[in-house]
């Protein structure tokens, strides 16, 4: 039951965010042609972009699990937010030119 609530909340948040964005941001200023949605660059294949997204999401999840969840790292948990932030920065630095970066474990 909890999983269903999480999925429905994620979907409701996505639709609400897209609705707000479409009301606030003028469509003639949108250079992506799809209101900020991600697209694969012409120089990369779909399978390459999928692999890159998988690796970026794995990096994020592994970092979260090892720094914020693992009981063995409880003493250094105060630094977890910094390390997680660096992993998100690294993934975005690599993936934005490829496909706009969609690292999100819930997708």
Image: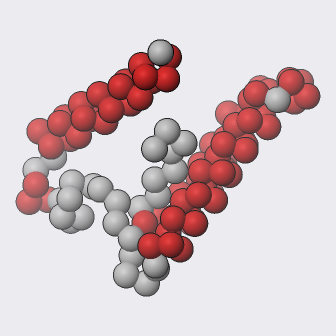
Out of 37 and 11, give the one closest to the viewer: 11
Q: Is residue 9 left or right of residue 45?
A: left
Q: Please provide percent x and percent y for residue 86.
A: 66, 48
Where residue 5 sits: x, y (%)? 42, 19
In the displayed orientation, state which residue is furthest to the front: 1
Residue at 34 percent across and 60 percent down: it is 38
Q: Is residue 15 visible?
A: yes
| Depicted 62 relative to depicted 39: above or below | above
Quadrant in the picture for residue 66: top right
In the image, 27: left or right of 17? Answer: left
The C terminus lies in which quarter of the figure?
Answer: top left
Residue 43: x and y, percent? 43, 84
Residue at 91%, 28% (x, y): give it.
Answer: 72
Residue at (54, 59) in percent of width and height: 53
Q: What is the basis of the colouring in this image?
A: secondary structure
Q: Is residue 25 left or right of residue 104?
A: left
Q: Please give the count of numbered marks on the rendered protein.
A: 0
Q: Is residue 35 left or right of residue 67?
A: left
Taking the view exactly as shown, the residue that stands out farthest to the bottom is: 43
Q: Quadrant of residue 20?
A: top left
Residue 83 image point, x, y percent? 72, 42
Quarter of the image for residue 82 reads: top right
**Considering only vertical position in the picture, is 99 above or below 60?**
below
Q: Residue furthest top?
A: 1
Query: Vertically, is 93 above or below 87?
Result: below
Nearer-the-camera pick, 99 or 25: 99
Res 13 visible: no
Which residue is at 14% across, 59% downward?
A: 29
């Amino acid at each position: 039951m909890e999983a269903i609530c999480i999925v429905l909340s994620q979907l409701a948040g996505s639709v609400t965010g897209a609705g707000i964005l479409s009301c606030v941001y003028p469509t003639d200023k949108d250079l992506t042609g799809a209101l900020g949605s991600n697209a694969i660059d012409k120089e990369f294949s779909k399978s390459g972009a999928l692999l890159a997204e998988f690796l970026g999401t794995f990096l994020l999840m592994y970092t979260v699990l090892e720094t914020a969840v693992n009981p063995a790292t409880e003493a250094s948990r105060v630094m977890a937010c910094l390390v997680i932030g660096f992993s998100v920065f690294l993934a975005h630095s690599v993936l934005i030119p490829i496909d706009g970066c969609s690292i999100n474990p819930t997708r």
